[in-house]
Image (spheres, rainbow, N blue to C red):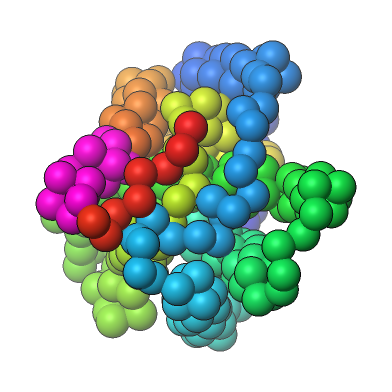
Amino acid sequence: MSISDDNEGLQYWVRWQVPVCALIIALPAVEAVKFIKKLKAEPLNHTDLWNPCWRNLNPLWVLVYRAFAFVCLSWVLYEVILLTKAYAFYFYTQWTLALVMVYFALGTIVSAYGCQLSSKKPPSGKAQEEIQKKVRFWGYLMQITYQTCAGAVMLTDIVFWCILVPFLLGEQFHLTLLIGFLHSLNAIFLLLDTAVNNVAFPWSGFAYFVIFSCTYVTFQWVLHACGFTWWPYPFLELRTPWAPLWYLCLALVHIPCYGIYALIVKMKSSVFPRLFPHAFVVRSH
């Protein structure tokens, strides 16, 4: 991670590629923010946050799984921080891992609350309203984090295993067990959670995924404006005349990445009821 010691600083940012790539970043971010502001929140059934989609599966097991996933991912991130120190969050992968950890932390807390609530007598109508108000904020935050994680883990793991490993392995990095965990456990844990959870997954969550990625790229630009010269991903380099094409491809790939996860969720809701009609619970809309 080097910091520039030459006089190219301003020269680097007056290239024609810079405003073009800036537009490719800014336009989707602005449109995503506009969309979110106009978005009307769908009614949230708080029990969907902790009840599994399998009839005979106790919510306590969902709680245990989410806590286990959080601990495992925390260990991976801890090892990465020990290895890379201050540069741990220089990569999009670590941002994604931290976000998945936030989801499982929220999921653990909400599941614990749900299990505690389930162990008590059914509350009255007025108490139900109070519970809804209490859970609503954390529930929507959990759902938004879940949707953002879904796209981010697909993008992270697809780019790593399909682009970086085949073309850059041995030149810029070596594949270790820790790096393998870093680029696979995020998706594995999230997919397993999807297999058992009842959390809604609308396409509107794509906007949050776009903002998350645009925030990371903006973070990289700020670092390089401050003197950093090394890009963690070659396709973010602005020096090449192909930069706008790379940035455009990176922007467009967000659609299939989120779409793949949305398709997985849809397949779960359509295939599992046929295979396990007495065990799988179809989520109420």
Decide whether residue 34 is among the magenta residues.
no
The number of numbered badges drawn on the structure is 0
Left/right placement of residue 133 relative to residue 122 reads: right
From the top left corner, tell me how far across and down residue 210 is, in percent. Answer: 52, 31
Could you tell me which residue is drawn at 52 percent across and 26 percent down?
204
Could you tell me which residue is drawn at 35 percent across and 44 percent down?
282
Q: Quadrant of residue 257?
A: top left
From the top left corner, tell me how far across and down residue 177 is, in percent. Answer: 28, 81
From the top left corner, tell me how far across and down residue 136 is, in percent. Answer: 74, 45
Whether residue 217 is visible here, answered yes or no, is no
Nearest the viewer among 133 and 1 is 133
Q: Quadrant of residue 14?
A: top right
Could you tell me which residue is drawn at 35 percent across and 61 percent down?
54
Decide whether residue 273 is among the magenta residues.
yes
> Looking at the image, is 61 positioned above or below residue 189?
below
> Looking at the image, is 144 positioned above or below residue 63?
above
Please provide the residue range marked out in magenta: 263-277
Nearest the viewer among 76 and 51 is 51
